[in-house]
Image (cartoon, coloured by chain):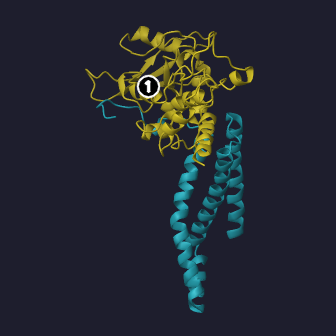
Amino acid sequence: MKTGRPTNLNLFSFKWPVTALVSISHRISGILLFPAIALLLYLLDLSLASEDGFRQAAEILASPAASFITWLTLAALIFHLIAGCRHLLMDIGIGETWRAARSAAIAVFALAGAGAILAGLWIW
Amino acid sequence: MLVSIYRYNPEQDSKPAMQNIEVDVPADRDLMVLDVLELAKAKDPSISYRRSCREGVCGSDGMNINGVNGLACITPVSRAAGPGRKLVLRPLPGLPVIRDLVVDLTQFYRQFEKVKPWLINDETPPAIERLQSPEEREKLDGLYECILCACCSTSCPSFWWNPEKFIGPAGLLQAYRFLADSRDTATAERLSELDDPFSVFRCRGIMNCVSVCPKGLNPTRAIGHIRSMLLRQGT
């Protein structure tokens, strides 16, 4: 509805509950995974093409920047997976009370954080 | 205590601005946000806001208090701002501001109207009244208590981006209130009117609505029930 009147929609002035933070992070991690999958498929293709290609792919992945991107991808994947499971459970009616949804949201962040640390240990 | 209030007067201002007002509050007791707002209005009588019952029943004084929607009359300052901190009052998000803390709720009411929030029953009325079993009546608990303060719908990003197509948490809670009513005979019609990609399915379950409802109601669960009913009807 266009009225010419102002609206209060400064997103940074709002305080967001943890359930909303899980939701927006779920989207952001999904967006990150999209180009990451293209990149990984390219590397897979390269490594399967020839022995030279495999060596090239290994070299690319060995660089510090690539390690960081791999870690970011893994962290995003872990978060997206866990948050997705919570979303599916809520879709079938589990954890729809405020207390359960809030606890589950905190658990998603905790588990995904732990997963990200483990992924970091594995990579570096 | 310092109070920061969103000010906009369409006759004078081209855009809104925050106004800081220093208010003297008693140190020995906790006030409600509305009390502080009244004190601020005593200093600057041009501040506009809606209020009526001052006890969380009428739903007039819904506003954004330090980033969270709530009723000013039943939100303690201690909980909203914390000791020594500034109280920040803005109008409910996403709706056009008429003046200061007063928003135009037309869009909100329009969505409420869409769900036909009244009992539809095409059977002949019985001689006395339409009876319900205690179990049937119990299904309406947590649904009928809504006071239409708009705190939930105006905290919902899905409603901000699609206020014309997404019914919003308040409207959907009422939609389910009549879908769940054993005396209502229009269940199938009600469901078919909600059966599109926007009316119900724009809800992403982020639960801002549940987190702010001053009555402790749960629109997310009601929306889940509607979704299940739609799926069952579709198969």
A54, B207: nearer the viewer? B207
Q: Chain of mark 1?
A: B
Q: Measured along the vertical axis of the image, is residue B218 above or below residue A123?
A: above
Q: Measured along the vertical axis of the image, is residue A38 above or below residue B231?
A: below
Q: Position of residue B184 (x, y in %)?
A: 59, 25
Residue A13 located left or right of residue A56: left
Q: Residues within 10 Å of mark 1 (few under 14, many from 20)?
A: some
Q: Position of residue A42 (x, y in %)?
A: 53, 77
Q: Quadrant of residue A122?
A: bottom right
Q: How many marks?
A: 1
Q: Extreme bottom residue here?
A: A51
Q: Residue at x 57, y 67 (%)?
A: A69
Q: Measured along the vertical axis of the image, is residue A33 above or below residue A111?
A: below
Q: Which residue is mark 1?
A: B109
Q: Residue at x 54, y 37 (%)?
A: B191
Q: Measured along the vertical axis of the image, is residue B51 above or below residue A33?
A: above
B26, B220: nearer the viewer? B220
B21, A122: nearer the viewer? A122
Give the colour chain B carries in the figure: yellow
Disc 1 element: helix
Q: Position of residue B86 (x, y in %)?
A: 52, 24
Q: Position of residue B230 (x, y in %)?
A: 58, 42
Q: Is residue A124 visible?
A: no
B141, B66: nearer the viewer? B141
Q: Is residue B76 visible?
A: yes
Q: Residue at x 69, y 21 (%)?
A: B137
Disc 1 residue type (three-letter):
Tyr
Residue B133 located left or right of residue B17: right
Give the colour chain A carries in the figure: cyan
Q: Residue at x 54, y 30 (%)?
A: B186
